[in-house]
Image: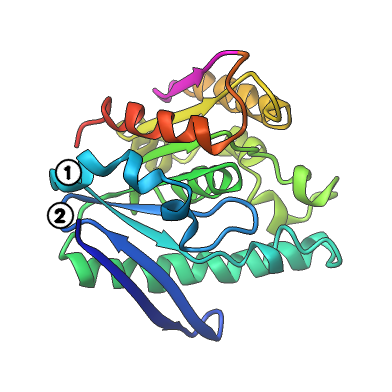
Amino acid sequence: MHIEHLSHWSGNLNREMYLNRYGHAGIPVVVFASSGGSHNEYYDFGMIDACASFIEEGRVQFFTLSSVDSESWLATWKNGHDQAEMHRAYERYVIDEAIPFIKYKTGWFDGMMTTGCSMGAYHAVNFFLQHPDVFTKVIALSGVYDARFFVGDYYNDDAIYQNSPVDYIWNQNDGWFIDRYRQAEIVLCTGLGAWEQDGLPSFYKLKEAFDQKQIPAWFAEWGHDVAHDWEWWRKQMPYFLGHLYL
C-alpha cells in the first residue's frame, strides 16, 4: 500500500498541518478525526486495514486530516461564538488549503468523498452540506449533528447556526445546494447500542429533513448490540464503501 506522511503550512491556522495519504489512485476520501483525534488515528485504530482491499484496488485513497477540535468545539472554556469562529478558520483551511493540496498530490479534480466516526462524522456531514461542490459522497458513522451538543443553547448566534446541520438544513432551500444533495451519495449510520444515544435525536431529525426535501440518503440503523466504538466502525466503513459507486 502506498503511504505518505505529509504536511503543509496553513495561513488560515498559522501553523504546519499534518495529514497522511493511504493509497495511490481512486477517489480521494477526506477523513475527519474523532474527538481529540489526530491524523494518525484512522490508521492506528485499524480503519485503513479494514478498507485495504478498496485501497489496493485503486478505488479509493484516504487523506486523514489533523483536527483543531480541542481549540473549537471541545474548547469548553470559550464562549460558543468563539468556538464556532475557530471552526470557521478550520473550514477555510480545509477548503482553501487542504483540498487544493490533495488535488495537487493526486491530480483528482472531480468530487471527493468525506467520512468520519463520532465527531468526525459531524464534520463529514457539515462539510458535505456546506460544500457539495467539493464533496459528492459522504459516509458518516455515529455522529451528533447538533451544535448544541458542543455549546449548549446558542441563542441565534449565526456562526454556530451555520455549523449545526440539524438546524440549517431545514432552511436550506437554495436550488443549487438541493440539486447537488440529490445527486450525491449520502450514508449516515448509527448503532442502537452503548454510547450511541447522544446521536440518535439529530440522526432522526436529519432523516426527517432529508425526507421532506426529497434528498435521497441512506440512514442506516444497526442493532442494539452495535456500540459507539471502533470495533463497529471497522465493520461499517468497508460495508458501505462496497455499496457506493466508486
- Residue at which label 2 appears: 25
x and y percentages locating residue 101 in the rendered image: 30, 73
Residue 102 relative to residue 14: left or right:
left
Q: Amino acid at mark 2?
A: Ala
Q: Amino acid at mark 1?
A: Arg
Q: Nearer the viewer, residue 1 or 129?
A: 1
Residue 185 relative to residue 24: left or right:
right
The stretch drawn in magenta includes residue 222: yes
Residue 144 relative to residue 240: left or right:
right
- Magenta region, residue range: 214-223
Residues under numbered marks 1 and 2 in contact, where contact means CB atoms less than 8 Å apart: yes
Q: Earlier in the sequence, mark 1 or mark 2?
A: 2
Residue 190 occupies quadrant: top right
x and y percentages locating residue 209 in the rendered image: 57, 25
Q: Nearer the viewer, residue 102 or 238?
A: 238
x and y percentages locating residue 191 in the rendered image: 58, 22
Q: Nearer the viewer, residue 24 or 157?
A: 24
The stretch drawn in magenta includes residue 224: no
Badge 1 density bin: few <14, some 14–19, many ≥20, Cα 10 Å: some
* Mark 1 residue element: loop
Residue 105 occupies quadrant: bottom left
* Mark 2 residue element: loop
Disc number at residue 59?
A: 1
Which residue occupies 46% across, 54% down?
44
Badge 2 density bin: few <14, some 14–19, many ≥20, Cα 10 Å: some
Disc number at residue 8?
A: none
Q: Is residue 146 above or below residue 188?
A: below
Q: Is residue 135 above or below residue 137?
A: below
Which quarter shows the N terminus?
Answer: bottom left
Which residue occupies 53% across, 19% down?
212
